[in-house]
Amino acid sequence: MRSSHLPHLLAALLIALASLTACSEPDGPADTPDAGDEDTSIDDVGPDADADAGPQSCEFQSECAHGTYCDTEAGECVPAPDCPGRQHWASCVEAFGEIAPELARRTSCIEEKCVVHCSLDTHCPAGNVCTNNGQCLPFTGEITGEHPGGDTPAPLQAGVANVLMKFPIGLSMGGYGSRAAINAGRYVESLRPSRGQMHGLYARGLALDDGTRQLILLRAPIIFPSGALHEAVARRLQEETGRDWRSSLVLSGTHTHSGPGRHWHLPAVEDAAIRLGVLGTDEFSQEAFEWLTDSFAEAALAALDDLAPARMGWEVVESFDVDDAISSDRWGATPAFDDNRVLMLRVDDLDGNPRGVLVSFGSHGTHNSGDYMTGDALAGVERGLEKALGEHYDRFVPVMYFNQNGGTMSPRGDRYGHRGPQIFERIGQHFAERVIEPLTQMETTTEWSFKGHTQRFSIQYDDLGYEPGEFGMENSPTHEGEFYHGAFQCDLPEDGDPATYATPGEFGCQGIHQIAFHRPVTLFGKSQLTALQLNDLTIVTMPGELAMELGWDIQRALRDAWGIDPFNSFTWGYAQDHLLYLSPTNVRGERPPFPGHSLVGDLDDYPDFTFSFLQGGYEAQMGTWGYKFGDYLVDRAVEAVGIMRGEDVTVSVPEPLPDEFAPTGQPTFPMDPSDPDDVGRIIDQPPAQVERRQAIDITWRGGDPGAELFQAPRIALERADGQGGFEPVLLPSRAPYDNREPVFMTRIRQGEDDAWEWGAYWEETKDFPLGTYRFRIEGHYLNADTGERTPYSATTDSFEIVPSTAMVIDQIEVLTPTIFTARVSYPPATEVLTAGPSEDRAKLVGSFRMHHPEVASGLPIPVMADTEFDALTGEVRQGQSALTFAEVTVTTAPETVEGRNNVPVTRVTVTLDGDLSEGDADFDLQLTDTLGNSGELLTTLNVDLP
């Protein structure tokens, strides 16, 4: 989760926590924004107590009523120390430091009494899970260890799913703190609402079955998944199949920063010193979490339902992006470290027709920070390859992107100066050009063997191997000054000098205990990773924003421990859970063997800690467990792979129960009814004629966003069939031409009467097929009489797509009395921007489509001399004479345009059939291209002969 604004926003928020810095006094954050708030109820901290019943016997802290704690030596509940209020938790740390030091790490102040929380499942009675930020609650799942699959090996069966995700437009997007806003809409709390979408967002899945073991790989365009989400989806599958899917299910987030949010179980606003949701994910919503669970579960079940005999192959393309056209190393604190590898899996039917493709490399989804939902650059990769596959195979083949070591990688696609959604189209074209050949030539087989193992692990300060003072802060009011609940936002600016690094214990951090009033935050106290074996391919997932350096450290450790060839291994970040950034401890050894790796020399050629958390930068600042956490994760990966392989492995840290949070009891979101006689009414019709490249805006009365869920109403393009009817249009990918694909930008607004209205912004390219078209709209509204979601549909007036008349002739220069030159182009594709009034804030102007792969947004687009130019005709009049064209030549060549080098520009050179003289001349010029588009220029110029 990265935003250029995020560190600054966090710094501003933490001004309110000034007493929590390295110079803070031991009495804690008395000046936090919540210091004067009333303390919250803790009905679930312990059982009800009868004050006259005598001491309560106990073994665990959760067995004692509020106002008491368990003296485990005596085996009874005894009075707990008093405290002034929750912001004064430091007094509880001090009190327990004297009477029970082992409890001082996990105490807080609630309702003027010190309370001891759990931080491990072993702090709870049997059958309970430590969750909800320090509470022991019954674990309601069933862990059977009975993996999905049959008894006999068999040829491969595979299933592919492509399921539209369940959420409404208006839900906040996970990713950017710069979207901070308080209660700005129905579906938001600490971020501003989404106001539209660039395309539909799909959960995609791949189910695999070798006869004895089934696996399901799922990805969704979200910032990241969580352990609780993985557990919820696994339980849904267990309910449907009767099998335990925890070690056979992978959930991955593409890491777009513009997907649905509010699904991360952050401490609630009333339980935290700051609104944690403003940092980029918004506050947790139970309903939003259920929507996402439904989306993943439906994709998984759809993939299982699609199981059929199949062939599959895999390949890693080396050196696929050594020029950084698609993604680039962004961790400026360390030398360049990019493996430039892309993993591809292709699933075919038995006849060799592709059914689905999985691709994986490291990147971020950070180009868009506006109010439209999108899968960002990663969706561009998927759509670009889908287009190439559709053109190659004449069928729609869904592509699913799984993020690799994206924590230290930035998306590109901007080399030629494209902006906004144009970048997504460009990056997709880049990607497809580089992988389509090896992908289509990939060998496949029906013979597969699968394994999987999910390893859960606790994360405790004592397990990380820190010496006293290495992961702490002087004068911190914690027990012994250590960050035993984790810390982030450390004072670690980018070092940039390999010979130097930060000294552990000598830099401050924002302790997680400080944010949560010293309660253990469940999100950061345990996690999980999954090891997979697909024939000879080994994959290990990592729960966070995995650095390239740490990804290699894992691959090397698997080689050294289990003999796994690094060319046959791969790592996936942003999968199974999320612990923010995952940086290496101190990567050493030889250079990674991959031929396209960007590292110069061997790792050992650089000083110690050159490739380390201790080099600082944003990637280190946003880690949660300090510099030794990288090695800790490497050890967990080695254990998980060893267990999966059947090796003799001793697990060195406790294995907790899966994540399970108690339902919040939040009310569901409201939904407004709509007038049945009004829904589907077109407000803004398309004009009777629409020129190619002309942007138009269609608006209509629709349903409440909750009724229109899933996402937005559908608008599709239809073409007259020549027999009095209309038929659906398909895209080059062979997907339907509708707003589920990035060919419309759909938005929501409310009319003057507060009724819900929807809009679709649409444009097409200079070569779009001519003909008669219309738009079909399909959606849902809430019927006030029945209380049910009710479908509606409508069609717009028909319109004719006609050739563009907007071609441009300019920059006329007279070279000699008989020769002049001119530039010929199509209009610039200006960057698309929101420019609407307050009642329609997401209304757009500009171009969201890419109209030339090598021309920046806002620059004239050349009429290519060899493929597009048709003719330049006309005359030049001067006085009574009219000179015509004796010869016209045309060339396209790179030039510097508005400071950008190597921009293709097309110029015509015209030889007249007579001589011009000095003075005014009237140029009457007509331009046409091979597609039927045209333009003209009628202008008077003063001829000044050289």
Image (spheres, rainbow, N blue to C red):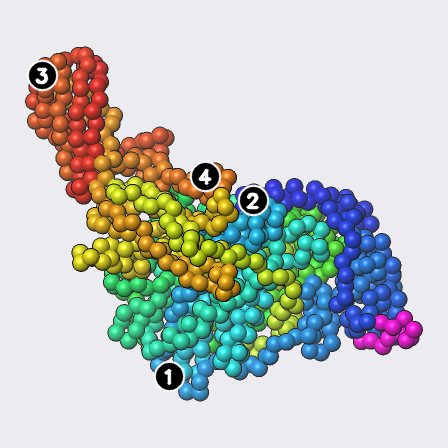
At label 1, the amino acid type is: Ala
As helix, strand or loop, the secondary structure at mark 3 comes to strand
Give the magenta range: 49-59
Q: Earlier in the sequence, mark 2 or mark 3?
A: 2
Q: Are marks 3 and 4 in contact (CB under 8 Å)?
A: no
Residue 140 placement, left or right of 790? right
Q: Position of residue 15 (x, y in %)?
A: 70, 42
Q: Residues within 10 Å of mark 2 (few under 14, many from 20)?
A: many
The alpha-carbon separation of the residues under discs 2 and 3 comes to 63 Å
Residue drawn at x 45%, y 49% as measured from the top left: 757
Residue 453 placement, left or right of 31? left
Q: Nearer the viewer, mark 2 or mark 3?
A: 3
Number of the label disc, if any, that sits on residue 881: 3
Q: Nearer the viewer, mark 1 or mark 3?
A: 3
Residue drawn at x 14%, y 21% as measured from the top left: 876
Say which residue label 2 marks: 178
Q: Earlier in the sequence, mark 4 or mark 1?
A: 1
